[in-house]
Every structure is written in C-alpha cells, then in structure tokens.
C-alpha cells in the first residue's frame, strides 16, 4: 500500500483534492477539504496529521466528528471515504501564496469574489504578468491568442507545470465550494500605495 507522509507532501495532498473538485478552508491548526457539506465526510490536513471528519459540524458543540485519524493514510484508505482520481493533480501549490492573473471583462468583480470566498485559507497575490504558481482566470471574451501567448511565455520561462487555467464556469463552481467553508465575513478591498488592504465586517445576509 502507498503511504502518504504528511510533513513532506501536504502541498501534494492539497493539489490532489483541489484537482478532484474539493475546496478547502482553515480549520483547527490546518485545513478542511470538502466538495459539498452534503457529502458525509471531509478531509483534514495539518502539518503532521491527517483525519477524516464528518462534513457537518455537531449541532451542540459546533465541532466535526473525527471518523479516522493518523499520521499517514494509504491511497486505499482514502478511497474508502473520498471518490478521488489519484492520477489528477493541480499545478498550483495552494498552501503558499497563489498568484492570480485575471483575463476577464470585469476584473474588479472577479477579484473581490475570489477574496470573499477564499480568505483566509488561500493567500492571493494578484499579478499583471505570468509567474510561477499562477492561476489564470479567463472568461468567454478572452481571445484565444491571449491564452496561447501566455502558454508560450510560460514555456519560455520554464514554468508551464506551475500554471493553471480556470474558466469562469469552473471559478463559479469552485467559488461556491470555497464559500461553504469561508468565515461569515464581507471583504472590501482598497488599493492604497500599491498594496491591498482588506477591511472585514460582518455579513449583512
């Protein structure tokens, strides 16, 4: 059986789950991964621990039940709880700063939505040029030439394996999944001296 060492492959585990359509949020001292809270199980990943949790919190104490926990799981053990395609992987290291390049008609709206749904689990850095560990968001108005040009630029820079592209359709699906795990806050982003400042206030709805 293939074992997974958490300390060495936490980023690879995050890549595996996101590639399979799971979103994640901060939980305890690590991260919790789910596709939807309607599923029976969630995956917990910390620096030196893994666990299978109940997706829904307990109604009394607000905590999720620990179904199974270990320093390592085999792929076979994970497959009992999660329908994962182990051949899939994301090109993004989600557990470090993620660069985001927006190629959308309404970049401001997309930017705010990304911050709203992924904060604070994902550390976003919006860029104007392609770099390593970049998520490219594009919509149906993005010219194919622009996408092909980015692909050539990534190839020239030797970072093709660290670039991932999401269409707006995929962003909407994943955004909803991240949103289920996000804190109940409203995020307003203000550009000041080239640095984004995030003001937090309770959600009004």
Image (spheres, rainbow, N blue to C red):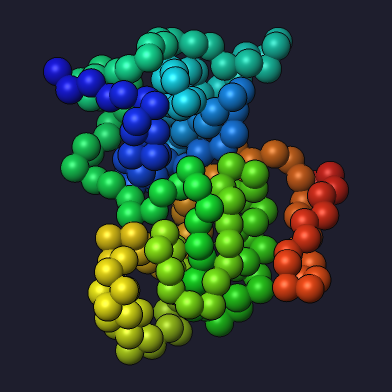
Q: Is residue 145 above or below residue 56?
A: below
Q: Is residue 165 left or right of residue 108?
A: left
Residue at 41% of width from left, 49% of height from top?
93
Quadrant where the N terminus is found in the figure: top left
Residue 34 image position (x, y, % from top left): 46, 34
Residue 35 image position (x, y, % from top left): 44, 38
Q: Residue furthest left?
A: 1
Residue 188 image position (x, y, % from top left): 78, 60
Residue at 79% of width from left, 73% of height from top?
193
**Which quadrant holds residue 8?**
top left
Q: Is residue 6 visible?
A: yes
**Which quadrant holds residue 196?**
bottom right
Q: Is residue 188 above or below residue 56?
A: below
Q: Is residue 194 left or right of residue 5?
A: right
Q: Is residue 23 above or below residue 73?
A: below
**Which quadrant holds residue 182?**
top right
Q: Is residue 204 visible?
A: no
Residue 68 image position (x, y, % from top left): 40, 10
Q: Relative to the observer, which residue lies in front, 174 or 26? A: 26
Q: Is residue 158 left or right of residue 94?
A: left
Q: Relative to the observer, which residue lies in front, 28 or 143? A: 28
Count of number-bearing discs: 0
Residue at 27% of width from left, 69% of height from top?
158
Q: Is residue 43 above or below residue 143?
A: above
Residue at 49% of width from left, 11% of height from top?
66
């Amino acid at each position: 059986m293939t074992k997974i060492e958490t300390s060495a492959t936490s980023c690879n585990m995050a890549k595996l789950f996101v590639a399979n359509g799971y979103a994640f949020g901060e939980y305890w001292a690590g991260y919790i991964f789910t596709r939807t809270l309607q599923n029976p199980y969630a995956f917990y990943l910390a620096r030196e621990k893994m666990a299978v949790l109940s997706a829904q919190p307990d109604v009394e104490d607000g905590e999720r039940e620990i179904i199974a926990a270990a320093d390592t799981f085999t792929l076979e053990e994970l497959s009992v709880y999660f329908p994962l395609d182990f051949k899939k992987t994301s090109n993004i290291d989600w557990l470090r700063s993620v660069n985001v390049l927006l190629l959308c008609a309404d970049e401001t709206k997309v930017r705010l939505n990304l911050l709203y749904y992924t904060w604070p689990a994902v550390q976003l850095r919006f860029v104007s040029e392609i770099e390593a560990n970049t998520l490219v968001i594009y919509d149906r108005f993005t010219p194919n030439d622009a996408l092909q040009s980015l692909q050539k630029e990534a190839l020239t820079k030797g970072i093709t394996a660290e670039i991932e592209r999401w269409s707006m359709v995929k962003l909407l699906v994943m955004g909803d999944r991240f949103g289920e795990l996000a804190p109940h806050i409203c995020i307003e982003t203000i550009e000041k001296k080239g640095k984004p400042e995030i003001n937090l206030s309770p959600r009004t709805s």
